[in-house]
Amino acid sequence: MSENIQQKYNERLRRYQAAIALEMPDRIPISAGSNYFAEVYAGHTNQEFIYDVDKWKEADVKFVNDFPEVDAFRSGRFWGPLHDAVGFNMYKLPGRELSPRTQFQFVEGERMKADEYDLLINDPVNFLFERFLPRTLNDFKEPGSARANVALIKGAMASAMLGGFMRNRSMYLQSELGMPNSMGGVFLAPFDYLADGLRGLRGVMLDVRRQPDKILEACEALIPDIVNAGLAIADPLRRSPIFLPLHRGAFPFLSPKQFDELYWPSLKKTMLMFIDAGYTIRAYLEGDWGPNWHHFRELPKGKVLCDIDVQGDIFKAKEDLGGYQCIAGGMPDSLLILGAPAEVKERVKLLCETVGKDGGFIINGGCGIPYDTKPENFKAMLEAVLEYGRYSDTFDFEIHMSPTPPAGWQPPRRRVVTPWEVKLQELGGVKGEESPIKKNWEMLEHMAFNWLFSWLW
Amino acid sequence: MGNLTQLAQALVDLDEELVNKIVKEKIAAGEAPLDIIKECNEGMGKIGKLFEANEYYLSELIMSGEILKGVMNELEPLLANVEKEASTADVVVIGTVKDDIHDIGKNIVVTLLKGTGFDVIDLGVDVPAETFVKTIKETGARVLGLSALLNFTFPAMKEVVDQLAAAGLRDQVKVIIGGAPCNEEVRQFTGADYLAKDAATGVNICKEIFGKC
């Protein structure tokens, strides 16, 4: 990496990390976790971007060259061929069920039945293989069939390929374009695993009334697997936050009482486990979180970047979260899509003078930059931040980067399908050193479980 | 709305067992199914009011719909012989616009509208402009609700309004837009008449249009 590029990378990352940590960088950082606009700006359709990884580089190069003021971004997390390999039915994809220029969309469904909580809690491996995956992966409808077996093989291979593509992309962004990732790795709130992929919205809302104890029990049981699955794909150097899209904790899905009892405790516990492991979190407060976001004050300061959606009031968010957590947002989607550059600049100026004036603020749309953003509006947003969002000419913030967790940290118990002890017994002992054999056996077992778990959402 | 009947109150309390018990007793006593439905509708109306007042949330709304579905299943066989009264209610046509498959918000509005006594024609999700126009033409409905969750739908909403105009129907129908990405700027872009910033507002706009306030 050339020195110049390295410097650019450090500058951007420092700015981003400083804001998250509630420090004052040289100016307000510009970062979207989901920069949808960056996917299509170079002229690709949504389908092209989801199906052809070669387009990523073209798109990234053009985007970064044309908008160098951006400090960190991430775009595109889907690779269509992986979904197709197993027949994943939780999303409709552009070019497949949707028109090629449309956004991917989540498909509601009841993929876990009301009476399957105990199985999920006590025997998740069998729950996944026998109940959940046959309903979720169309190529795995008949477990044991050749088609189903091949689906698993293809799916695992495709996942490994996608991992490689993502790594290469990050490396390229870093070493050729000097651009940090705004996020790495992902997890959901335990309640949202139930509400999204497992029980579905209708199912979980009935459970809230009929069997709230089961919800609580399941949320608790899911935590270790959520943490392990999230850590497995997080940035090993702990530079960028882990992505946490939050769904059904928004108003008016749950009453404040239901939120406090059923949604928050397990979410808080999960977030604290990631924070203890040395990570920060970027939480999308999707929808209107106004009645509930005050809870983020209970977490260590400057660890959870909260993206405020268009239905939330960014000024109120600043009032409630200022001094506790950094917030991102403030640019209405409709303004970026329908507005004019002068209006965009006016809005940025207002944000810089109010919510952004004392740090802890990152400029963004509502949890992302829309696909249909007018390029001239995006440009105007960046220019206006340079004009109105400056804090100082110099700043000295040390980049947070650590390949190891804090001293004393232990991962939660890692799930395997076949424990090493069973394997060892079958082998009748080993003739050489046991530890390298055991270590790798367990690593692959654990990866396999994470792969199964990854289809929950 | 006066005091609720025991059945309506049980529904408002989301007491599934009690609702089912009362309905069974009423059926056994030979009460007319339409009268039973009327009592349930009163309960649903009250639930809508509680939702508007932030006393009930989505789980309560979905639960009440589930209980009602159970009641309707009980009554269905008895309704076969009952002549349906011609609908005198005011008709609202609603749907999620083209390329968007989200319907949670729309379904809340439908539940509240029905609870308020409107007749609702729900066209579902991913509804092409042509289908909205055709339905307005056929039913003569005076209100059209366009729903969306995703922010790429602004042109799709505008398309519906434009096609209504092209079909000469624009003056007969009031168009309301609603859903996460909608605001006044979007309303102006689409040419819709009203913006419903939440479900309750949408229902109140319908009442206003039909002079029910």
Image: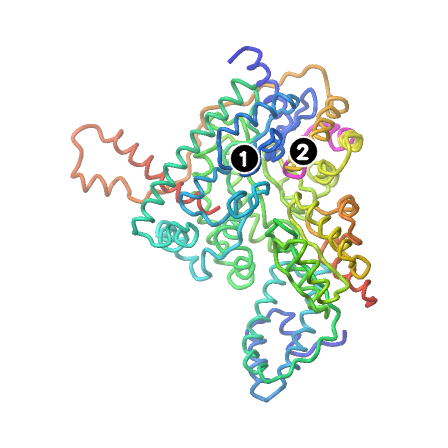
Magenta stretch: give its range: A352-368
Give the amino acid at mark 1: Gly
Q: Which residue is mark 1?
A: A76
Identity of the residue furthest to the bottom in this view: B29
The earlier-in-sequence mark between 1 and 2 is 1
Tag 1 and tag 2 share a subunit: yes
Report the disc number at residue A364: 2
Residue in the image at 32% along x and 39% along y: A445
Q: Nearer the viewer, residue B30 or B169?
A: B169
Q: Chain of mark 1?
A: A
Residue B167 sits in which quadrant?
A: bottom right
Left or right: B11, with A207 as reference point: right
Left or right: B197, with A454 as reference point: right
Residue B42 position in % (x across, y down): 70, 74
Residue A353 in magenta stretch: yes
Residue A130 sits in which quadrant?
A: bottom left
Is residue A257 among what the camera can see? no
Dominant SS type (magenta): loop
How many other residues sit within 10 Å of disc 2, few (<14), some (14-19) or many (≥20)? many
Instruction: Classify A17 as above or below A90.
Output: above
Instruction: Classify B133 as above or below B86.
Output: above
Q: Secondary structure at mark 2?
A: strand
Is residue A420 among what the camera can see? yes
Residue A245 position in % (x across, y down): 57, 42
Left or right: A49, with A121 as reference point: right
Q: How many marks?
A: 2
Instruction: Classify A320 as above or below A400.
Output: below
Q: Chain of mark 2?
A: A
Residue in the image at 78% along x and 43% along y: B185
